[in-house]
Amino acid sequence: MFTDDFTHQIGSVFNVQTTALLAKQSAVAASTFTRRTGRLSASLQDRATITGTAAQLEYPKYIRFLDMKRSRTGARKIHGPIYNRPIYGYLVGGVRRFLNAAIPKAMIRAIDGAITSVK
């Protein structure tokens, strides 16, 4: 469905967006979770694995529990989000902006090519 050039462009957009995502998460982890073992900050230093039109990020399993509003004892936690939807909005928003600009251009090129070949 995608041409090689388009796939390469999507890969570069994924690379830029995942790097920005990991940088934002590293900043939150450095300012909020400093008394821990260091596994979180080490995992946020890794790069995303980008294959074609997919990006894969690996985190420790406990990162999902860091965003819970209350601790195990019921006390309210006060810190910024590190894993939840607002953070992934950065990644998805950047990719959507790229696709909203690139797909119409690709369709116009395909239609122009079809019209040119008919003449």
Image: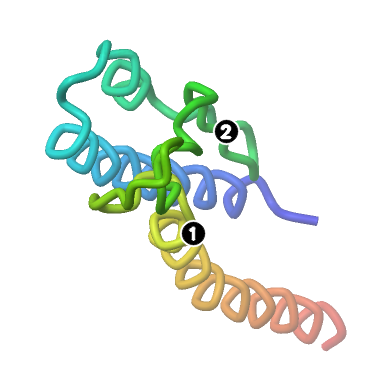
What amino acid type should be assigned to the residue bearing mark 1?
A: Arg
Residue under the point 27% across and 22% down: 41
Look at the picture and state if 57 lies above or below 9: above
What percent of the width, then of the height, locates residue 13?
Answer: 44, 51
Q: How many marks?
A: 2
Q: Which residue is mark 1?
A: 85
Front-most of residues 73 and 31 = 73
Residue under the point 82% across and 77% down: 117
Q: Is residue 20 left or right of residue 53?
A: left
Which of the labelled discs sits on residue 118, or is there none?
A: none
Residue under the point 58% across and 49% down: 5
What percent of the width, then of the height, locates residue 75?
Answer: 34, 47
Pointer 2 local density, CA inside 10 Å: few below 14, some 14–19, many at least 20? few
Label 2 secondary element: strand
Look at the picture and state if 67 lies above or below 66: below
Front-most of residues 1 and 20 = 20
User: Marks 1 and 2, Cα distance to the nearest angstrom?
Assistant: 16 Å
Q: Which residue is mark 2?
A: 56
Look at the picture and state if 23 lies above or below 109: above
- In primary-sequence order, the first of circles 1 and 2 is 2
Q: Is residue 62 left or right of residue 16?
A: right
Quadrant of the frame with the N terminus:
bottom right
Q: Is residue 32 left or right of residue 110?
A: left
Front-most of residues 43 and 115 = 43
Residue under the point 41% across and 49% down: 70
